[in-house]
Image: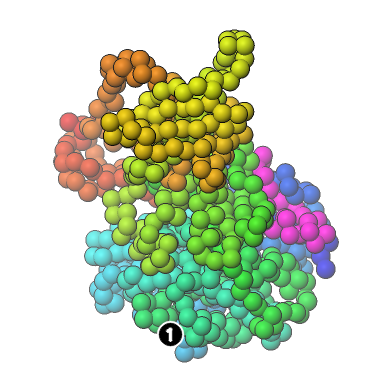
Amino acid sequence: MFTKILIANRGEIACRVIKTARAMGIATVAVYSDADRSALHVAMADEAVNIGPPAAAKSYLVIDAIIKAAKQTGAEAIHPGYGFLSENADFARALEKEGITFIGPNVKAIEVMGDKIESKRFAADAKVSTVPGYLGVIKDAQEAIKIAGEIGYPVMIKASAGGGGKGMRVALSADEVAEGFASSVSEAKSSFGDDRVFIEKFVENPRHIEIQVLGDGKGNAIHLGERECSIQRRNQKVIEEAPSSFLDAKTRAAMGKQAVSLARAVDYASAGTVEFIVDKKKNFYFLEMNTRLQVEHPVTELITGIDLVEQMIRIAAGEKLKLTQKDIKLKGWAVESRIYAEDPFRGFLPSTGRLVRYRPPEEGTQQGLTIRNDTGVTEGGEISIHYDPMIAKLVTHAPDRDLAIDHMAGALDAFYIDGIQHNIPFLTAIMQHQRWRKGDLSTAFIAEEYPDGFSPREPDTEERDRLAIVAAMIDHLGNDRRRQISHQMEGTRVRFALERIVQVGEEKIDLTVIGGDDNSIEVALAGVKGKVRRRARVETDWWFGKPIWFGRIDGEQIAVQVRSIPNGVALAYRGLSVNAHVYTLREAELAALMPIKEPPDTSKMLLCPMPGLVVTIHVKEGDQVRVGDPLCVVEAMKMENILRAQHDGRVDVIEAAPGDSLAVDAVIMRFE
């Protein structure tokens, strides 16, 4: 067994590998760019080596720098994680030449299956059902348009060396092919150092289901069941689960058998994933094979009890696979939510900055329910513009799917992040979505259910009542605290009824607060003509300064995020974010007289929606533009974002230029 390994990656996956290596008694070496000098994976590893500037192309993608770090520290093997060099055959070949073990498959497997074009050719030759498409290298946009027309729209443009949704575009017309081809080539080059793309038929409304495989290169190969990865946005997985609620035993066995056969055909020796798209009739088609650890591997680990990273290390060290197919038992259900640094209320645009507060829910298992949080950040750390926007992977496990989803909803409520925007409200909203809960999924789920983007929803009556009750409890505790500080009423708690008006968003709720013991009160909510429509017993040990209000309302445990605002609190719960103000009757009268501040008019400006780098300006001053016309391209976190005209108009002044680094809401151009 190895005594020291180097992790050629960063963020949560580097931390994940370090945890298993530590448990196996193996020393670890982290590599880091200048931007990651204070990153969590650097602090966790036994040793750390700087490998270059922030840009991945000058650090994490530089093979010579990583090999030099391994030699310098005496690392015997390198785990590549996912992304970066994880599917780069040149990297594996270079390590072999230097006598350093690659914790991954052999070069042949990487070359055949790691390359999306070659893998499809290999699968087709092996009589595996594949999606129709053109597997040759496409030289320019005109050739791409010609090929797309022959295949038939819609088509998918994909990076040959890609993964993680990078370099992927769906095109419905020739114009979209031309635009998507340029973006795919650019993203592929910056993300993988390989600008080749290919085109295939886009199967509409499919499910994305993948099979986890393990092989030892000695003839032993097994599968560990499937993962459902159909909840995607811009081809990037958002929520995964294992197993899939859609597959029956027959289809699962057929997919598993095909995945194992494919792995054996390339003498696969490591953990890998065979991905399929599955139509409504359970017909499945080979999509690609990822010759690496997948982002979503934790859901498989939780339902099988198998540490995939440990298996990768043992196989790389020359051990035979001790597991057989009969040993694989799927127990319970697991759900994974990817926490991203992005603003769901502004088209999911990337968000960068400092994590002023980062308080994930407590990990562990209680009463058969598990929470796991794989992360690579800490409070006070910075989300950089240079890398993928993932903050963490939150995973729950329970005896069945409904319980796993409910547990995820509660865990998301208890996940507190401040300083940047994040997608937790969106993830929480999906957990409540009836179509998701029914398992009626496809890769078009988000596009179909949120065609106009994600926007804050209004709370229903039950949710509004709960938030009003929490706000009333916080106000009550605040009043008690002030009385004790000022020694009013001899520091005793108020036990008589107090009438309050709680404004939750735009709605006002009349209620009465009745003091109780040190951590409980009773709240009576008024209905028609002042009659009590509901009484609730509230219990909590929450106190000021805690970011999460944990408590019980009529015995039911809930978690609500609390942030202070002038004269009230901002509450976040189940994907809702509302401001709550608790007034006495006289305060409510006065509050109604306060003027409402109007926001500034920005309708004649193009504002930068995220921190990013201006790549291209498509227009010049004086140009007439129409709705939907591309105005400029801004790159953030390795993704190019095309900003389009929202109104017809004429460009008056352009205030930014290619190469400029812009902050959120910086003015790019003004219109007449």
Q: What amino acid is labelled 1 in the image?
A: Ser
User: Of 42 and 397, which appears nearest the observer?
Assistant: 397
Query: Residue at (29%, 54%) from the top-left corner?
Result: 451
Q: From the viewer's perspective, tell me whether residue 21 is left or right of residue 582.
A: right
**Residue 29 lies within the magenta run:** yes
Location of mark 1 (residue): 129
Instruction: Name the image quarter holding residue 370.
Output: bottom right
Mark 1 is surrounded, within 10 Å at the Cα level, by few (under 14), some (14 to 19) or many (20 or more) other residues, namely some
Q: From the viewer's perspective, tell me whether residue 576 is left or right of residue 594.
A: right
Query: Residue at (32%, 15%) from the top-left corner?
Result: 590
Quadrant placement of the C terminus = top left
In the rendered image of this protein, does residue 298 appear above or below residue 414? below
User: Of 232 and 437, which appears nearest the observer?
Assistant: 437
Instruction: Name the image quarter holding residue 151.
Output: bottom left
Query: Residue at (59%, 62%) from the top-left corner?
Result: 398
What is the magenta range? 15-41
Q: From the viewer's perspective, tell me whether residue 278 is left or right of residue 255.
A: left
Q: How is the image coloured?
A: rainbow
Query: Residue at (69%, 86%) from the top-left corner?
Result: 219
Q: Position of residue 444 (x, y in %)?
A: 35, 64
Please tell me whether mark 1 sits on a helix, a strand or a loop.
loop
